[in-house]
Amino acid sequence: QVQLAESGGGLVQPGGSLRLSCAASGLSLSDYAMGWFRQLQGNQRELVAAFISLTDTVYASSVKGRFTISIDHAKNTVDLRMTGLKPEDTAVYYCAALLFGKNWANVDFWGLGTQVTVSS
């Protein structure tokens, strides 16, 4: 059974930093593309950052230069390091996995999400 468990969300002031972590079980990170999405209330989920191959990454233009996605194959975790946080980054952040080669519109597995709130 595949499980993706996010952690690390919380309340942070504008300009601050957070590290989100996704612990994956039941799948190999060598077989699945891993990514982070976020969803603002009432909006669709949007791709924030993802591995599109074992080494190549993509980022939403709104977070490029501020967020960094990384994988630890030994721990089977995918992290999202977020710096320079802005109020508009406030959202529920979801870890996602899909087989390499598939379109991100067809995610295979989702985590339950973790809330990130950026506010003074």
Image: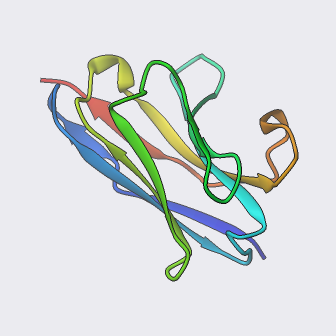
Q: In the displayed structure, does residue 97 sit left or right of residue 91?
A: right
* 53 and 118: which is toward the camera: 53
Q: Tell me how many marks there are.
A: 0
> Residue lying farthest bottom?
74
Give above or below for 102 relative to 26. Answer: above
Give above or below for 5 relative to 53. Answer: below
Which quadrant of the rendered structure holds the C terminus?
Answer: top left
* 19 and 69: which is toward the camera: 69
Could you say which quadrant of the image residue 99 lies in? bottom right
> Residue lying farthest front?
55
* Residue under the image location 48 percent in, 36 percent down: 92
Which quadrant of the rendered structure holds the N terminus?
Answer: bottom right
Image spot of residue 112 (x, y percent): 59, 52
Could you say which quadrant of the image residue 111 lies in? bottom right
Image spot of residue 68 (x, y percent): 40, 44
Image spot of residue 107 (x, y percent): 79, 45
Q: How is the image coloured?
A: rainbow
* Residue under the image location 88 percent in, 45 percent down: 102
Q: In the displayed structure, does residue 85 sit left or right of residue 21?
A: left
* Residue under the image location 49 percent in, 80 percent down: 75
Image spot of residue 94 (x, y percent): 56, 45
Q: In the displayed structure, does residue 76 sit left or right of residue 25?
A: left
Could you say which quadrant of the image residue 97 lies in? bottom right
